[in-house]
Amino acid sequence: MKNISKIASGIEPSATLAISELSKELKAKGVDVIGFGAGEPDFTTPDNIKQAGIKAIETDKSYYTATSGILPLREAICKYINDIFGVQYEPSNICVSSGAKHIIFISLQVLLDPGDEVILPAPYWVTYAEAIKMCGAVPVILDTTEETRFKITPEQLESAITDKTKCLILTNPSNPTGMLYNEDELKAIGNVIIKNDLYLIADEIYATLVYNGKFVSAAAISSELKERTIVINGVSKTYAMTGWRIGYAAANKQIISAMANYLSHSTGNASNVAQYAALEAYSCDQESVKKMNIEFAKRRQYFIDRVSKMDKVSCLEPDGAFYIFMNVSKTFGTELCGEKINSGSDFSQALLKHGLVATVPGIAFGNDNYVRWSYATSMENITEGLNRLEKFLNSEPTA
Ligand SMILES: Cc1ncc(COP(=O)(O)O)c(C=O)c1O
């Protein structure tokens, strides 16, 4: 039989798979594992949004819609972006899709030719690198460290640019580090983008989950930068709607119409019913978002306080999102609960096996000195998970 495509065979399986499989195996055996891997809010979708979805079913919102999304939703998104982020768009600047992940994929398909380079600051959300490769393009990884709070500098960006560079992907706030680029930093990076005639994919899916500092959208920096920026956002994280699968891109009309063409021959429109639920999410008062954010902020503070008292692990205080990117490199070369630890992956595996706590090894995000913890789980779980971590660091197994 002939081989499957070179592109398909080059796609890496998710690096989180090994740990999540071990975690499932343990759970299936009735072992009490606490999961910190999930990149999704543990809250349920707010009631008014659920009701809008139910109403959409009852009123037969069961047909195809415009490929780029129903007009009322695109209008509501424009109003929301203007109210919350101070950026003006028209509905023809918006393309709705089946989740932010999908519109990131479509953005890359629209921008890239085979051989093009995309600059990707590490630690990065794992999907980007594979989605770039799916276009036959090349991810160019820019490593960052705690010294710059995991943020790239304009000089670093400039030095990575070649005549093949097409765009930069910037996640703000970041998954996995939670770091936030401020207005001046965005301006400086934007200047490099403009000067070198690049595009910017600004993944702002965590924009409303900020606890420290003020979020500024890349598109708010200048009209010049806005013109060459594709802003990515969606309902998953802000409204606890991961399973509804609604995301959107905001960009110039040429890009949006090319995206709609791509969608029209692939998924077609995003779920009609889910679009009505998203319409409610973007149009209603944002009280439920505030409530969830207050809870996330409490958990974040508790997490940081506990970790600051541990001497073998550490973390920078994240500005946003709901992740702690924990530096575990001090444990390298030692044994914990009888396991040799030489990487974040070793740490994560051993913590799961002996501490019954599931985390994501940093290698999934391009840096194996770390493990990522999501605090999108209950305070009770966080407290017990950190108790187990402390025991593990003292080589006392929970299992
Ligand atoms: C940085 C980032 N972008 C995009 C997504 C995807 O969001 P969605 O559920 O809308 O596909 C995620 C989800 O984990 C994410 O962390």
Image (cartoon, rainbow, N blue to C red):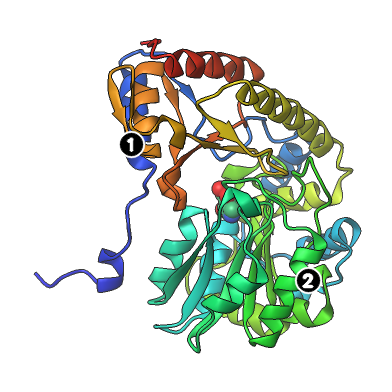
Say which quadrant the N terminus sits in.
Answer: bottom left
The crowding category of the residue bearing disc 1, from other C-alpha atoms within 10 Å (few below 14, some 14 to 19, many at least 20), is some
Residue 357 left/right relative to 68: left
Q: Amino acid at mark 1?
A: Asn
Indicate whether 122 appears above or below 154. Answer: above
Identify the mark nearer the N-term, 1 or 2: 2
Q: Amino acid at mark 2?
A: Lys
Q: Quadrant of the C terminus?
A: top left
286 or 128, which is in the foreground?
128
Which class describes the residues within 10 Å of circle 2: few (<14), some (14-19), or many (20+)?
A: some
Residue 117 lies, with reference to residue 378, above or below; the image says below
Q: Where 352 sits versus 13, above or below?
A: above
According to the image, label 2 marks what residue?
Answer: 187
Residue at (79, 48) in percent of width and height: 280
Q: Residue at x 68, y 41 (%)?
A: 318
State whether residue 216 appears in this view. yes
Quarter of the image for residue 343 reads top left
Q: Along the line of sight, which residue is nearer the eye, 378 or 142?
A: 142
Instruction: Please name the residue that numbered disc 1 is placed on.
Output: 342
